[in-house]
Structures are given as C-alpha cells and as structure tokens.
Image (tube, rainbow, N blue to C red):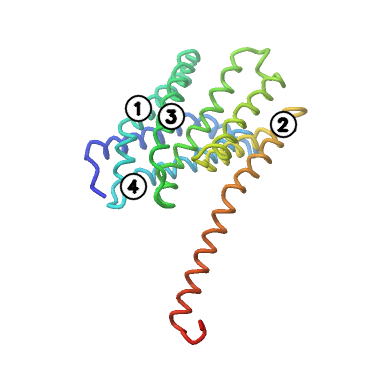
C-alpha cells in the first residue's frame, strides 16, 4: 500500500497521545483512592486498557507499508477530533461543569458513530486490519453509547438508582449489539463482546430485575458471537485440512490413487 501523508500520521499519533493522557487523567482520582476490592469501575478500567493498547497498535500500524491507506484516509482527521473532544470532556468533568461535559459527550458519541458507520465501507482484509483498525472503534463506540445512556439518567436522584431505568439501558444497548452481530452484514462480534463485558460488570453489582436482565442479555450476546465465529473457524479448519490433504496427495501420488 502507498504511504500515508505525514500530516495524517502526525494527526493520528497526536490523537492517541491525547486519548491516553486524557483517559489517564480521568481515572487518576480513582487510582489514588482505589481500595483493594473489585468494583464496577474496574471493568471499565480493563476495557479502557485494552482499547488503549489497540489504539497504540492503530498508530504504529499506519507506519507500516502493509497499512490500508484507504481506511486511514477514510477515517481522516476525525480520530483527532474524537481525541480533542475526549480531552475537553475530561477537563469539564474535572471542574464539575457537568452540563457542558455532557454536551461534549454527546458530540463525542456522534463523531464515533460517524467514524464507525464509515468503516462499514472498509471491511478488514485480514486479522491485523481487524485488530488494529476496525476493532478499536467498535470497542470505543460500544463503550461510549453505554456511557451516554447511563449519564442521561444520572442528573436526577429519581432516575439515578431506578430499576426500570437500569433495565431500559441494558435492553437498549443489548438490542443494538445483537443487531450488529446477528442481523447486520458487519457481523461485529467485537462490538457485541464489548457490550457483554460492560453488562457483565453491571450484573455483578446490580440487584433484582436489572441483575437478571443483564445476565440474560450477556448470555444472548455471547451465543450470538458464538454463532458468528464458530462457523468461520470451522470453515477455516476445513480449508486448511483440505489444503494439507491436497499437498499430501501431491507428494505421495501412489496413496492418492
């Protein structure tokens, strides 16, 4: 593939540095006051850590000759915009400007959805493309859809701990994930697994109806992912076995008669 422009490479590198810095800043207070007990935010920390590793891979991958130039150019400078908005939202939350931060959060989600939607025109060529180009934006979009829906109901004490609200959020993000993995041509199992991980974290610490609904949704999503991946694995295994059998037949013609 042809090399990307220097401006785009520098833009993506700066974006990754901004994201890692701003996300680290957001979680710094939690790290300083963290107890030894495993809490709901630990699930988010693990997910964010995986996302950051993949985004670092996304940044390094663009410098390699095998990088898909058309995909990086399709993403363009939108990745940098996402990083800038993310940094601004982190600062606004820090200064307790909650309303402005939430507006920024909406802008960030809208930008992520735009990039995620654009990536449907660039299916991954191989596992490397999928891991370092498509997967990060699947995780990012799934996570921030949950964050926005959750934050919508955090401004009122009546809806903050309401079981009906929690159930609605679980069903809403579960429905979107199930559609993307089971009914969409994208078969986005990364998005579905991300949502399943988020809901598993919620199920551990929720009670009553939301707890049950979250566990059921996790089971549905995991089974949908299995329906997507297992046939592909079996098909690859069958092709590989056929290839081995053909090679063996070429090397031992007497046995193939």
Q: Which residue is mark 1?
A: 81
Q: Which residue is mark 3?
A: 112
Q: Which residue is mark 4?
A: 60
Q: Which mark is residue 115?
A: none
Residue 211, quarter of picture = top right
- Taking 256 as reference, is 155 left or right? right
Q: Earlier in the sequence, mark 1 or mark 2?
A: 1
Q: Earlier in the sequence, mark 2 or mark 3?
A: 3
Marks 2 and 1: in contact by CB < 8 Å?
A: no
Q: Evaluate whether residue 6 shows in this view.
A: yes
Q: How many residues crowd around disc 3 within 10 Å: few (fewer than 14), some, or many (20 or more)? A: many
- Taking 219 as reference, is 15 left or right? left
Q: How many residues crowd around disc 2 within 10 Å: few (fewer than 14), some, or many (20 or more)? A: many
Spatial CA distance of label 1 from label 4 is 19 Å
Q: How many residues crowd around disc 1 within 10 Å: few (fewer than 14), some, or many (20 or more)? A: some
**Which secondary structure, mark 1?**
helix
Marks 4 and 3: in contact by CB < 8 Å?
A: no
- Tell me where residue 84 appears, x and y as whole percent: 36, 26
Spatial CA distance of label 3 from label 1 is 10 Å
Residue 111, quarter of picture = top left
Spatial CA distance of label 4 from label 2 is 40 Å
């Amino acid at each position: 593939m042809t090399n990307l422009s220097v401006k785009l490479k520098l833009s993506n590198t700066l974006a990754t540095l901004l994201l890692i810095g701003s996300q680290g800043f957001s979680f710094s207070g939690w790290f300083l006051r963290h107890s030894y007990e495993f809490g709901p935010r630990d699930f988010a920390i693990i997910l964010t850590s995986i996302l950051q590793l993949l985004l670092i891979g996304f940044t390094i991958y663009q410098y390699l000759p095998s990088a898909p130039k058309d995909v990086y150019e399709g993403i363009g400078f939108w990745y940098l915009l996402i990083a800038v908005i993310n940094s601004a939202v982190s600062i606004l939350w820090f200064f307790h400007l909650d309303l402005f931060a939430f507006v920024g959060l909406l802008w960030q989600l809208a930008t992520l959805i735009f990039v995620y939607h654009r990536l449907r025109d660039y299916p991954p060529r191989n596992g490397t493309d999928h891991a370092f180009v498509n997967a990060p934006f699947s995780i990012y979009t799934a996570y921030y859809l949950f964050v926005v829906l959750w934050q919508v109901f955090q401004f009122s004490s009546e809806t903050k701990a309401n079981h009906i609200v929690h159930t609605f959020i679980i069903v809403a993000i579960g429905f979107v994930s199930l559609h993307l993995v089971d009914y969409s041509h994208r078969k986005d199992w990364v998005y579905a697994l991300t949502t399943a991980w988020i809901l598993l974290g919620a199920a551990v610490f929720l009670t009553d109806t939301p707890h049950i609904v979250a566990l059921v949704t996790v089971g549905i999503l995991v089974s949908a992912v299995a329906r997507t991946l297992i046939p592909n694995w079996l098909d690859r295994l069958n092709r590989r076995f056929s290839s081995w059998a053909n090679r063996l037949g070429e090397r031992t013609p007497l046995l193939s008669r």
